[in-house]
Amino acid sequence: MKNKASVVIIGGGVIGVSIAYNLAKAGLKDVVLLEKKYLAYGATGRCGAGVRQQWGTKQNCILSRESVKIFENINDILETDIDIEFKQKGYLLLAYTEKEWNQFKKNVKLQNSLGINSKLLTPQEAKEIVPFLNTEKLLGAAFYDKDGHANPFLTTIAYAQAAKRLGVEINKGVEVKNIYIKNGRIKGVYTDKGFIETEKVVNAAGGWSAEIGKMAGVDLPVYSERHEILATEPVNEILGPMVMSFSYNIYCQQTPHGSFVMGEGPKKSVENNIKSTWQFLESIAEKVTWLLPPTKNLRVVRQWAGYYNISPDHQPIVGDCKEIEGFYMAIGFSGHGFMLAPAVGILMKDIILGNNLTWDVVLDIGRFERKEIINEPSVV
């Protein structure tokens, strides 16, 4: 492990490796990434693997739109032959309340203005896309056929390999113990394997980002929340799009391998606990078999849990820290870091190198103090 680096990135999820790759691609030397377990150990490897552009804020729409462009061309961009299993069969979002339906109308208008050609559907039109969908109580739906799914493990590996080819040192099994600060400036990182001298640290630690912030003496406005997911046995393809409802609190999709992956938001916030529960299995089974009746014949293979790192407005915090010079963060993705990671890596590269931003996206931590908050309404 190097004892000196231009930038140290803490966190070996897809956000961390995307940032590392983009910094190295821009010509920055001596980039070091630290991961305490293995790549994709945290939220990346525990996510639902969805990739959508149907959001309710301009910032999330732009980041997701640009990320999808990268997902579509990732083999050429990263110069890799890894198949990240990116499929685009859409997201079907379901509205069960008037408030939700009115929000869908606003969302689609915003998305269309940004080149995301989503559309509103009647319950019958939704059923034409998913014939076995239970449309009872359904007021309407939104759909975009360019949304889809990708494999988070393979995506992370693809970025990591591309970063290493460009000179990034990726250290797995290395835990950060503290951050050395002098006169309000980053000076280095203490790990269980030694000290690394650096003037720039990127907090991309996901569910552990608040702890990294405390090491830098910064109280970050994020918390980690346990979410649970399950996967079924693989079967022949019967479901094309991801089916999701915010008010019914569920998402369900069929992966390219045939397995169904589904999850729901938590009943309550649970920190420091990523164990799965029988209560989740009971709850999700009741929900999904009502919504998508054929799923009652599926057998569950496994279930697991992971952290959503939640920000106050359910949008990521991407930027530097005014209190500590050289401390940067890409955190608070509220369960959607995987699908935004390709564009966030570019945005963080711009911020760290002091370049003009590639896109007009401002998600700095200062927005909370400035009261410039637009809550993202479209989250499970």
Image (tube, rainbow, N blue to C red):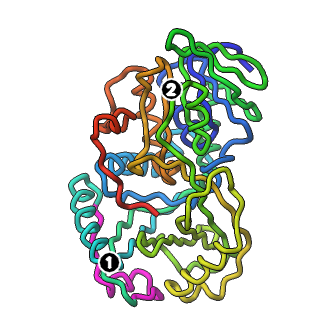
Query: Residue 184: x and y, percent?
Result: 50, 14
Query: Residue 244: x and y, percent?
Result: 45, 71
Quarter of the image where the N terminus is located: top right
Query: Measuring 57% from the left and 54% from the top, which residue is drawn there?
Result: 225
| Location of mark 1 (residue) | 97
Relative to 202, is 153 on the left or the right? Answer: right
Instruction: Indicate the secondary structure of the residue bearing disc 2.
Output: helix
Query: Measuring 57% from the left and 49% from the top, which residue is drawn there?
Result: 224
The amino acid type of the residue labelled 2 equals Leu
Which residue is more in the foreground, 70 or 211?
A: 211
Q: Compared with residue 111, is residue 263 higher up or lower down, i.e. above or below?
A: below
In the rendered image, residue 364 lying in the magenta stretch gets the answer no
Which residue is more in the foreground, 269 or 163?
A: 269
**Where residue 356 is drawn, which disc sits there?**
none
- Please report whichever mark, 1 or 2, sits nearer to the chain's N-terminal start: 2
Which residue is more in the foreground, 221 or 135?
A: 221
| Magenta part of the chain | 117-135
Q: Is residue 33 visible?
A: yes
In the rendered image, residue 124 lying in the magenta stretch gets the answer yes
Category of crowding for the residue at label 2, using alpha-carbon neighbours closer than 10 angstroms: few (below 14), some (14–19), many (at least 20) = many
Relative to 292, is 105 on the left or the right? Answer: left
Relative to 253, is 246 on the left or the right? Answer: left
Which residue is more in the foreground, 169 or 377?
A: 377
Category of crowding for the residue at label 1, using alpha-carbon neighbours closer than 10 angstroms: few (below 14), some (14–19), many (at least 20) = some
Instruction: Indicate the secondary structure of the residue bearing disc 1.
Output: loop
What is the tally of numbered marks visible in this picture? Answer: 2
Q: Are the two marked residues, 1 and 2, in contact with CB atoms closer than 8 angstroms? A: no
Query: Residue 319: x and y, percent?
Result: 42, 31
The amino acid type of the residue labelled 1 equals Thr
| Location of mark 2 (residue) | 23
Query: Measuring 58% from the left and 84% from the top, which residue is drawn there?
Result: 286
